[in-house]
Image (cartoon, helix red, strand yellow):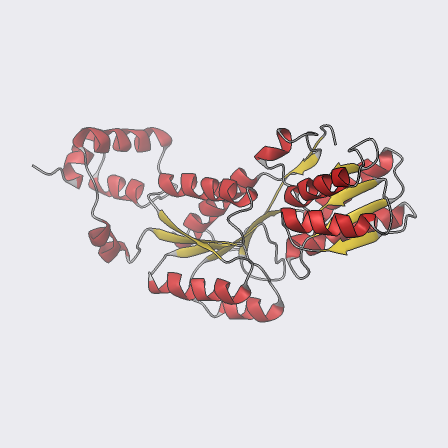
Amino acid sequence: MKSTINDVAKMAKVSKATVSRVLNGHLHVSEEVKNRVYKAMEELNYRPSGVARSLVSKKTQMAGLILPDITNPFFPLLARGVEDAANRYGYSVFQCNTDNDPDIEFAYIDKLLEQRVDGIILISSNLDDKRIRRLTEYNIPFVLCDRFAPSTSFDSVSVDHYKVAYDAVNYLISKNYRCIAHISGPLNVESADRRRLGYLQAMAEAGLTPLVKHGSFSYQSGYQLTQALLSEIIPEAIFAANDLIALGAIRAIEENGLVVPKDISIIGCDDIFIADIYKPRLTTVMIPAYQMGIKAMEILQQRIAGEIDLPQKVILEHRLVIRDS
């Protein structure tokens, strides 16, 4: 005989309403009670009906996650955080990859709305005023992730990208490097723009001349832009806007007969897993991707459940990781 919610409530020694609150991810249930309910569900092999639950709650227990580049190792780690938190709340997650194309981004938003998702976690390719206005037209909760729009009503989870770059460049300056180049991410992407501004501020405060190459957040971009840079000048150090750029830069430097860090020092950004196994091991700034994903899903669930009113603007801590480069 198929188990019912009443069977779960009886075994867990709680009310039917409490079981329902656990299934719908309400925060105001103690961990001890949640564990009893989950244990009872497992022992009884109870599987709640998603269709029935959505009819009662008007919720589908589905969320969307829109990523700019799934091939960048930073974003699968963030997605893992979203998935792990979503599983705790009984949510399924639709993942969408935009290849940094704003038009694909909004096409995916429309598709997710057709699937009646309860909310969307968005890592946007471009958050200009026009696109922010368009997002506000959707009657659905959004959490901006790895991007920050302080003047909007959107919830957001990110790091201080400006401070990330400022700290990295000041570390290079503290090591007496004076000719420091920056290989940037794409223009009009908030994280890349803020990191570029942080670099420029640190250089200005030290009375140093900036040198910026604009590209994309990719290994190939790091390689190509470093080749172009080395045809003009041999910098003492490079601050790369992310680790993929930094790794591409190292390859270009080595192909030009130079050695990292003997001839050119490099700092990346993100601390993807390969940064610690590449040779030389990459000095970088750790961005807590997994924790960012968890926090974004927690906020989205709270927003969907109506448990928060004011916009949540969460800034997570970054950390400089000193290795060999």
Most extreme residue toward the left is 1
Q: Nearer the viewer, residue 106 or 310?
A: 106
| Quarter of the N terminus within the rendering | top left
In this rendering, the answer to whether 239 lies above or below 319 is below
> In the visual, does 45 lie left or right of 68?
left
Question: To which quarter of the image does residue 82 belong?
Answer: top left
Q: Residue at x 73, y 43 (%)?
A: 252
Instruction: Note whether residue 290 is visible.
Output: yes
Q: Looking at the image, can residue 13 be seen? A: no
Query: Does residue 77 appear left or right of residue 324 in this picture?
Result: left
* 277 or 40, nearer to the observer: 277
Report the quarter where the C terminus lies: top right
Q: Residue at x 39, y 61 (%)?
A: 112
Query: Residue 243: horizontal and vertical position, in percent?
Result: 65, 41
Q: Position of residue 109 (x, y in %)?
A: 44, 63
Q: Residue at x 31, y 29 (%)?
A: 35
Residue 159: x and y in percent read 63, 45
276 displayed left or right of 65: right
Counting from the top left corner in percent of width and height, residue 204 is at 88, 50
Front residue of 237/250: it is: 250
Q: Is residue 169 left or right of residue 271?
A: right
**Residue at image point 34% right, 28% down:** 32
